Every structure is written in C-alpha cells, then in structure tokens.
Image (cartoon, helix red, strand yellow):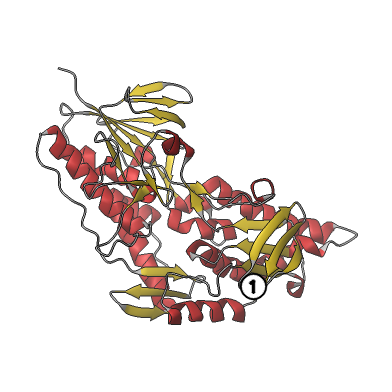
C-alpha cells in the first residue's frame, strides 16, 4: 500500500513549523513528507528590517533547514514553485514535478506595486535575506559613492520609505539609528542625510492604539525621520520620487526608495483557482481551503478572521499557532478522524523603533520604550526554542535583551 504523500510548500514560520510538528507526530510508515523551499535555510522574517538597516548581520537571521528537520522522515527539496494543478494534484517546480495527496501552502504573498508607474523598476522591498542584504549594500554604496565623488550628488544621501505600517516603521527606526554609524564609516556629514517616510493616511501604524501610534511618530521624528502624512505616491524614477499632498505635487531627489506599502497574492496560488479574500487564500476554521479539501493553508497566505469577522493580521505568532493545527489535522485526516478548529487568539500588536525603543499592546496593556523591545526579544527566543530546542536557542538566540 502506497503511503500518502504530504507536500509542504514554503519554509516560512508556518511551513517550517508544520514540518517540525509532523515529523514528531507521524511515523515513517504513516506518510511520505516533502518540504519545498527556495533556499536551504529558513529565516526569521521579524528580523529582516534589522538586516536591511545593517544593525544585524543576515547570518544571524538564517537557520539551516537541515539542522531542524529529521531527514529520515522529511524529504527536503530546494526549488521554486511554478504552478499548482489541483485537478491532477500535481505541483510543477522549476526542476521537477511532484504529486501530492495532501498539500500545505505556506508561501507568503508578494509586494503590491498597485500599478504605480516605476514602482516595479525603481524600488526595493524587504522580502527575504537577499533583498534585505541588497538594500543595506545599496545604501552603503551610495554613501561611499558620495564620499568619493568630486561633484557631490546629495540625492544619494536621500532615503525614502513608502508606507507607514509595521515594516516601514521598524525599518525607519533601525535605519535612523544606523545612519550616524555609516556617516562615520564613509566620512559623510550627518546633516546631509535625509530619511523620509511617505504615508498615505493621517497617521502611522493604522491598526495600533492612537497613543502608541503617536509615541512612534514622536520617537521617529525626534531622531530625524521626516514623516510626510497624506502623501499619495504618483511615480518613481531612477533618481526621484514623485508624490502628492492635498492636490499639490512634490518631488524628492533620491536613488533609494524602499516600498513597504502592501502585499498581493502570490501568483502561484492566485492562478490555481483557490478562493481569495483580501489577497489571501480563504480557509475554514480547520485551515482547509474553502475551494479544495486536500489543501491546507498556513501563515501569511491564509485569510482568517476573528469572532467579529475582522481579518486577523498575519504575524509569526499567528503562523505558528496555525501550523500546530494544520499538523494535528493532517494526522487526524490520515486516521479518518474529525478535524479540529483553529481558535483565533487575541494577538498583541508590536513594533520596534530601534534597538531600545518600541510600542506594543499585550493583553490590552499599552507598552512603550525598551519594554516593548524586551517583549520582542523574548518572543523571538521562544520561537527558536519551539523550533529547535535548546541547541537552536543557544546557537541563534538574541540575549541582548536590554
């Protein structure tokens, strides 16, 4: 009798945790498990803004997948997903094809360029280790280039962030702290460097409590971030960003525009015919796709809502909780037992504003300053422990808690 084949696409928080849970819950004779990921490592998405700013080396955010999974139970393939053929239960990768009996989709969404002219061609996005490293090297190159140019081009020292959500705010907080370090390294006068943030709404961190959002704005502005509210992005060019405020057009001369303004559905699952809502895949409470009962969805690409019908924002904590339910339900499905539901939990909101500043809501309590950063460090370390035990925690943990 052939063993059922379980395929997991993506090794983000949800995908990798599903794999780790399954290898503990299923015996070798119960199922064949295949994990597909673009890289040979998993990375902590919650640290990418630090990698991009240069305050944390990218190797600190990488975790080798072979160090986490039991390769006697899980077949790991480094490849990219091209398409999902649901009718035939086949997946086309760049270098091979796979057949599945049960599929877990854990691939994240992609940056949404919203049809703005030049946004695809002339912007940078913080999506993975490589993109974060490229942003850091690009900024450093412009500083070095400015220092060496005979005819100085100050637009090389203008950095623009598009979008005042969590990622944009966290990156701004890290980068504004790192700018003095880069100025000393490349002999650049700090007063010549400008960090702009364009936000279409009247405030940053729209989903946060008003007091927390105000604190974040004050913190960033006090350190030199120039925040422009109600700024509607019109066009990006290789050396300028054009935006509009109250009907009046403005231009910032810059060679560095980092877009953090939104995401769109991954073309792979968009073309597969799955039901989408708000650019994510609709699922039932048991994390099965509403379109296909052989497909589970986990993490950023799963659309889930709370008891009030409000979308639950994708976070690492959400993905980890869903992974536990998905792994459990796959085990139950193989035993022909009733599946369990993923119970929405009240999640806190957290955004760091640099190494020693941040804002958070934890169980309806507002947290400001270094305490918010402490909460994040503890959360990151707890994740490492859940993923790989004490060995991984001691190897990759961040113990600079204050």
Query: How many labels, in total?
Result: 1
Residue at image mark 1: 228
346 is higher (above) or lower (below) than 117 = below
Residue 89 shows in this picture:
yes
Residue 56 shows in this picture:
no
The kind of secondary structure element at disc 1 is: strand
Of residue 212 and residue 192, the one placed in the foreground of this image is: 212
Q: Is residue 184 left or right of residue 95?
A: right
Question: Going by the picture, which residue comes out furthest to the front?
Answer: 247
At x 56%, y 45%, the residue is 130
Instruction: Give residue 233's position: percent from left, percent from top.
Output: 65, 61
Q: Is residue 164 left or right of residue 283?
A: right
At x 62%, y 57%, the residue is 258
Q: Is residue 228 left or right of residue 326?
A: right
Question: Going by the picture, which residue comes out furthest to the right?
Answer: 151
Instruction: Give residue 354's position: percent from left, percent from top.
Output: 52, 70
136 is higher (above) or lower (below) than 109 = below
Instruction: Give residue 265's position: percent from left, percent from top.
Output: 46, 45
Dot 1 crowding, Cα within 10 Å, few <14, some 14–19, many 20+:
some
Instruction: Give residue 172's position: percent from left, percent from top.
Output: 58, 67
Q: Is residue 220 left or right of residue 206?
A: right
256 is higher (above) or lower (below) than 334 = below
Of residue 365 and residue 20, the one placed in the foreground of this image is: 365
Q: Quadrant of the N terminus?
A: top left
Q: Quadrant of the C terminus?
A: bottom left
Of residue 338 and residue 45, the one placed in the foreground of this image is: 338
Q: Would you identify the image quadrant in which residue 21 lies?
A: top left
């Amino acid at each position: 009798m052939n063993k059922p084949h379980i395929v997991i696409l993506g090794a983000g928080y949800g995908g990798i945790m599903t794999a780790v849970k399954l290898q503990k819950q299923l015996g070798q004779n119960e199922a064949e498990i295949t994990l597909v990921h673009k890289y040979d490592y998993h990375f902590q998405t919650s640290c990418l803004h630090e990698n991009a700013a240069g305050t944390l080396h990218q190797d600190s955010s990488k975790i080798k997948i072979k160090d986490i999974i039991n390769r006697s139970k899980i077949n790991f393939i480094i490849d990219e997903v091209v398409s999902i053929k649901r009718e035939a239960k086949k997946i086309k990768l760049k270098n091979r094809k796979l057949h599945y009996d049960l599929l877990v989709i854990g691939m994240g969404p992609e940056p949404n360029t919203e049809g703005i002219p030049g946004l695809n061609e002339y912007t940078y996005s913080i999506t993975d280790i490589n993109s974060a490293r490229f942003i850091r090297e690009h900024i450093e190159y412009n500083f070095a280039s400015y220092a060496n140019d005979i005819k100085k081009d100050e637009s090389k020292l203008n950095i623009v962030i598009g979008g005042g959500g969590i990622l944009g705010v966290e990156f701004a907080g890290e980068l504004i702290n790192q700018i003095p370090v880069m100025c000393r390294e490349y002999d650049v006068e700090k007063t010549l460097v400008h960090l702009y943030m364009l936000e279409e709404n009247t405030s940053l961190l729209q989903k946060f409590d008003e007091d927390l959002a105000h604190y974040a704005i004050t913190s960033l502005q006090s350190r030199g971030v120039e925040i422009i509210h109600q700024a509607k992005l019109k066009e990006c060019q290789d050396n300028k960003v054009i935006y509009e405020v109250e009907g009046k057009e403005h231009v910032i001369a810059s060679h560095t525009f980092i877009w953090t303004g939104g995401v769109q559905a991954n073309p792979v699952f968009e073309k597969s015919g799955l039901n989408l809502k708000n650019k994510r895949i609709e699922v039932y409470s048991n994390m099965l796709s509403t379109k296909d009962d052989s497909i589970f969805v986990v993490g950023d690409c799963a659309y889930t809502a709370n008891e009030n019908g409000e979308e639950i924002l994708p976070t690492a904590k959400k993905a980890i909780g869903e992974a536990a339910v998905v792994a459990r339900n796959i085990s139950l499905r193989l035993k022909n037992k009733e599946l369990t539901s993923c119970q929405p939990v009240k999640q806190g909101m957290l955004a760091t504003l640099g190494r020693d500043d941040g804002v958070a809501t934890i169980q309806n309590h507002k947290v400001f300053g270094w305490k918010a950063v402490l909460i994040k460090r503890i959360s990151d370390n707890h994740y490492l422990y859940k993923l790989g035990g004490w060995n991984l925690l001691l190897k990759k943990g961040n113990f600079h808690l204050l």
